Structures are given as structure tokens and as C-alpha cells.
Amino acid sequence: MKEFVKLVIDGKELTLPVIEGSEGEKAIDIRSLRQETGYITFDPGFGNSGTCRSTITYMDGEKGILRYRGVPIEQLAEQSTFVETAFLLIAGHLPSREELTRTSVYLNDFSPLHENMKAFYQNYPPKAHPMGILSAMVNAMRSFYPELLDIEEDMNKTYLRLISKIRTMSAMAYRISLGEKVVYPRPDLCYCANFLNMMFDGVVVPYRIDDDMVRALNVFWILHADHEQNCSTTAVRVVGSGKVNIYSAISAGISALWGPLHGGANQAVVNMLEEIHKDGMTVKECISKAKDPNDPFRLYGFGHRVYKTHDPRAKIMKKMCDILLAKTKRKDPLLDIVQKLEETALNDSYFKEKNLYPNVDFYSGIVLRAMGIPTNMFTVMFAIGRLPGWIAQWKEDVADPEMRISRPRQVYTGNQLQEYIPVDDRG
Ligand code: CMC
């Protein structure tokens, strides 16, 4: 039976329909509100606003559930690969063996970069942040690869071109920032092994591909592949709603991801741990700073808009961290600090009362360090992982008959009407 809610405004009763999702989530459909009453809703940060119906990712923040197209994140992390998960997110179903093979062939075919695009890199200042370079390069793809294919196709070549080239562009940005020779993609390697090889294969010392590292990278990217309507995905949808091309929409997502409250948190966590390690700050000071309402500092890697319990991705990331450090027989001094911070925060009444738990970024920096990834590439690693989610969400958005250009309202609190005063009369 269809459900409704009644809203009384200025004595006028409005009946609003309720939309129910497949997992029982409910939303009041307020689309007629302004037209019927002149009122709008006020919800900074959209914490209570649904902006679309979506079939891609399901999260339950109270129970710590995350599923892509219905499949639990734990099963994907255990058994899938990043490429297969990307296919699942974008096409909506797990690929057949034949679809998977075809996808791999295209990913290989598209992996080299247009020679003229490389000139871009050479002209960036040496310490330029790779996220800035990456978002510019992805936007530039519209000019270098102008053909945009039919979005009706489940997994079209434009999506595969993006997924393939973001890996080449990211590894290349890193090599050039070190002043090292670019390593080209190898058709005999899978997606993750190819990336590690492009990053680390030295001219003198060849990179030895390690299956455990390749597996760890697959898991890392699977965990980041989508997270429903987060900040960067919302940026992709909002920018895309103006009917801009997919490259520009994804480039906006990369820029949005860069901030320390979102994808940049993985770099911020390691910077924070290093500061504690250098004795610049103690764990206790770090926790007090994070709790001080007058200090903008936050305990990076903690808290989440949706999760009010453990982030399921953080649990998997923590496990992977132990596996990788045991494997590399490396003792990372930051690991002890991260564990001490976690224990202190989880027993602190401030964090308990506000339901602040470790999120995916709390342990991801340690995992990336164990793989040899430098700190300034951490957010780029997140971006590569999130790309399939952005594509899936963009694709869903442009095909959705209910979607309109994103254009929120505001409550104006500025000056009321005042007369213009010519400059000579202003005193
Ligand atoms: N350290 C200290 N206090 C915090 C933290 C934190 N990490 N996170 C939230 N709070 C406090 C916040 O000050 C606020 O207190 P009060 O109610 O007294 O004003 C309360 O908890 C609620 O926080 P909020 O900022 O209103 O919550 P939000 O949903 O707007 O923000 C968040 C979510 C993730 C931006 C925030 O928890 C945060 O800044 N965390 C640190 C950055 C971080 O780790 N980001 C990565 C998120 S996971 C990766 C991703 O998907 O982007």
C-alpha cells in the first residue's frame, strides 16, 4: 500500500508521497513543496536529503553494511578482482568469462597514452601534487579522445578507456615527479600488476611482481570502488547534470576527492602519524586537539557521515595491513601509533558519544606504505579505485528520466533592497 505523510504549513495541509527503497529505507517526496507552499527545505551538507534513486551501492551506517549491486563488500574483497568489481558496478552484473576477457583486452589496448599528452607532464613544476595533474589530464582527455560512445552499452569503450588510462597517467605522474624514465604498460600483466610495474620498475633493478602485493592492491581498489552519494560522487552527478561530457564530470570528482575531509584523509592520517612519530605531538595531545571545538584539527581517519559503527572497509583494511607487514617483515613505526590512537579514541567519551569509529582511511596509509606507495600518491590511489563508482553513478544519472539539472535553492540572508551610490558620492 502506498504511504503518505501530511505536512501542515500556514494552515494548509499537504499530502506528500513516501518513496521506499528495496532495503526498506524511506524518503518523503517533497518535489511539490515549493510550488504548493512557497517553502523550501534547509539541509546544509545534504545529510537528510536523497537526490536520486540508485541501484548501485547499498550502505547501512548503523549496521556497518556495504554492498555493491547487492554483493557484500567482504565477499568481493575476498574473491573478486578490481576489474571484475568495476564491471559489476558499471554494467550492473558480474561479467561472464567472455565479458571479462573482452574487458581485459580493451584495458590493454587503451593503456598507452597519446604522445602529446605526455608533454603536459613535462611542463608541470616538479613538486606539483599528482591529484592536480590527474584532474587536469582527465579533463584533457575530451580533446584527445573526442569520440564519446553510446551510453546505452553496458560497458562501453569510453569507460574502459578511462579506467585504463587513469592507471597509466597516475604511474606516469609519479615517475616524472621523480625525474625518472616513464615505464610503459605491458600487455602480459593484469591491471594491478601493470600499475605496480609502471610505478616501480627501475632501469637498473627490475621490479619483481609479487602476487601478495597484487592481491593487496586489488583489495585496496575494491574497497574504494564506490560509496554511494559521497562528496566526489555528488560532484560528478552535479557537474554531469549540466550534460557536460563524462571526462569533465570525472575530473570534477577527482578535484572533490582531493580534500582532507574526503579522499585526502589518507594522506592527512599519515602526516598526522608522522608528526606524532617525530615527537611533534603526543597521542594524548592529538586526541585533545581533535576534541577541542576551537581547533580545526580533526582525528583524520575517524568519523563518517553514514557509518555510526565500524566502517566495514576499515576492518578489511586493518586485516590487510597485518598481512602485508608480516609478509614484508617490515616494522612500520607508524603502526604502533595508529593502534594506540585507535584504542585511545575508542575508549574516549567524546568519540563514543559522537559514534566516531575508524573509517577506511585510518589504516589505508599503512597499507599503501607497505606497498611502497609514496604519501603524495595516496589520494591518487583512492581516485583510481573510485573511478568505476563515478562512472556507474554518472551513467545512472544521465539515463534517469527523473533527473534534472542540479540547482538547489537558498535562504537569502543578505541586504534588503538598497540604492546604488555612484563612487564619487560614497564619501
Ligand atoms: N575528529 C574529531 N571530531 C570529529 C571527527 C574527527 N575525525 N569527526 C567528526 N567529529 C565531530 C565533529 O566535530 C562534530 O562535533 P559537534 O557535534 O560537537 O559539532 C561531530 O563529530 C559530527 O561531525 P560532523 O563534522 O558534523 O560530521 P560530518 O558527517 O559532517 O563529517 C567527516 C564526516 C568524515 C567529514 C568527519 O567525521 C571528519 O572530518 N573526519 C575526519 C576526516 C576523515 O577521516 N575523512 C575520511 C572519511 S572516509 C573516506 C571517504 O569516504 O571520504
Image (cartoon, rainbow, N blue to C red):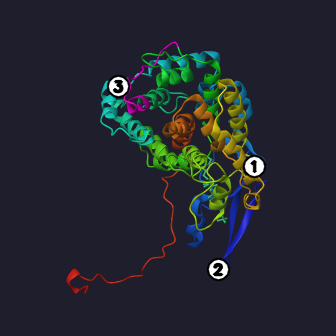
Q: Dot 1, crowdedness within 10 Å: few (<14), some or many (≥20)?
A: few
Q: Which residue is mark 1?
A: 343
Q: Which residue is mark 3?
A: 114
Q: At which x and y percent is residue 216?
A: 64, 27
Quarter location, residue 120: top left
Report how far apart the C-alphas of labels 1 and 2 lie in the structure.
51 Å
Looking at the picture, which amino acid does disc 2 mark? Asp
- Label the magenta part by its dominant secondary structure: loop
Residue at horizontal 69 percent and vertical 47 percent from the top: 358
Q: Dot 3, crowdedness within 10 Å: few (<14), some or many (≥20)?
A: few
Whether residues under marks 3 and 2 lie with C-beta atoms below 8 angstroms apart, the answer is no
Residue at horizontal 51 percent and vertical 42 percent from the top: 398
Report how far apart the C-alphas of labels 3 and 2 lie in the structure.
62 Å
Whether residues under marks 3 and 1 lie with C-beta atoms below 8 angstroms apart, the answer is no
Ligand 1, by image quadrant, is bottom right
- Label 2's element? loop
Asked whether 105 or 362 is in front, the reply is 362
In-image side of 113 versus 317 (left or right): left
Using the image, determine if residue 355 lies above or below residue 236. Answer: below
Q: Which residues are magenta?
A: 173-188
Residue at horizontal 62 percent and vertical 61 percent from the top: 289
Q: At which x and y percent is residue 296?
A: 56, 62
Asked whether 342 or 224 is in front, the reply is 342
Looking at the picture, which amino acid does disc 3 mark? His
Q: At which x and y percent is residue 71?
A: 72, 33
Q: Which residue is mark 2?
A: 10
